[in-house]
Amino acid sequence: MPESETTHGAHHAIVGKLCGQELQDHQQSAAAKFAQALDETPAQTVVLSSEALEGFLRNRGYAKTFFGRIRELNLEPKLVLLPRNQPQWINSSYSSMVKGFRRSEPFEIFALAAAQQLTSRFSPWLELADAYGIELIARPFTSEIIACGVVPEFLQTIGINSSEFRDAQIRRNEAAGPFTIAVARGVLRLICGTSRQLKWLQARRCKAKLATYLWGKGLADSGYCGLTTALARHIEQQLRSDNDKFAQRVWGKPWAEIFAADVDVEFIPNDFEVRRPSWSTARRLRRTIGEMKAVVEEILLDPALAVEAPWNDLRRWAGWAPTTNI
């Protein structure tokens, strides 16, 4: 796993450069350093891990550039994909985006729109693999895997025994809870409404400041759920055909059989816009939003974080490109 230009172990800069992205000045050499590391460190397997890559590879232009450059480095690309039942995936995605100051609309509006988008379907990954002649390795990201830990599952998928690593069982990137979501969403609505989007650097700073504030005040929580059972069934019904197409191709079984513990699950939402919090929690929430609003307003006044550049556009890191059809 390359060590250069990583963000907590993620290779966002490397994959961005390999996809043809414009990066910050200090990251421009990410691909060159990666190529140098390949020459200096012989290995049978090279692992590039970045959530941004999921968005990039859904863009035709970025995908073509990425796989072309990978093969120029004499590497044979393989894609490791961990599909998840979409209601749970959409719930997790919403939590991640809101706590990252990227979205602020109500959960149901987000979920219904997400279910309609191509990004919620897995069959395009089959088409991508076929188009570039690459191996697609799919492992179901089930509730059992979440309980046991995804790191050992991933390591086993690429042929490595997790017992070789002391910290393979450590859980990272825990999902936020309803209080955290309500604070981030409330602050972003007060600052930007629901249409304006922060710059990438601004959003990163806001996310970090919020996490520090909540941990310092003993208010950090986890386990957000915006789903109702009816909404989850609606999403599953919409995506059933595409899911079965994917599951039959990669596992030879229906989706519902692979995700038996995840489909038809009952959900009780804890989103404060659906289930009103107690009086004391609501008062604490108002105070926290007010204090964090002042912090975010100060962040937005920093010109170094508001620079107009392609790499500072949050949409680019999700695979958006101004001149390429997605």
Image (tube, rainbow, N blue to C red):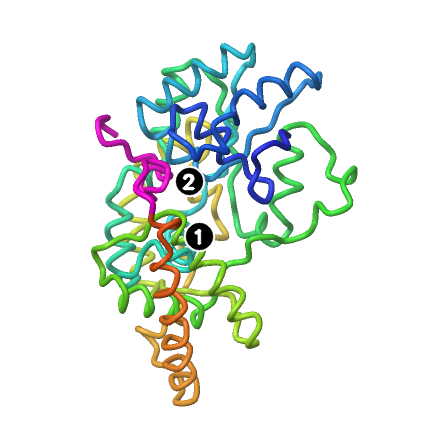
Disc 2 target residue: 255
| Residue span colored magenta | 307-326
Of helix, strand and loop, which one carries label 1? helix
- Principal secondary structure, stretch drawn in magenta: loop
Q: Which quadrant of the structure image shows residue 21?
A: top left
Q: Is residue 76 above or below residue 152?
A: above
Question: How many neighbours does mark 2 have within 10 angstroms: few (below 14), some (14-19), or many (20 or more)?
Answer: many
Instruction: Report the front residue among 36 and 129.
Output: 36
| 135 left or right, relative to 311 | right
What is the C-alpha distance between the residues marked 1 and 2?
Answer: 36 Å
Q: How many marks?
A: 2
Kindly identify the amino acid type of the residue bearing the numbered disc 2.
Trp
**Looking at the picture, does residue 55 appear above or below residue 17?**
below
Residue type pointed to by label 1: Arg
Q: Position of residue 36 (x, y in %)?
A: 62, 18
Q: Which residue is mark 1?
A: 204
Query: Magenta span has 222?
Result: no
49 versus 77 height, above or below: below
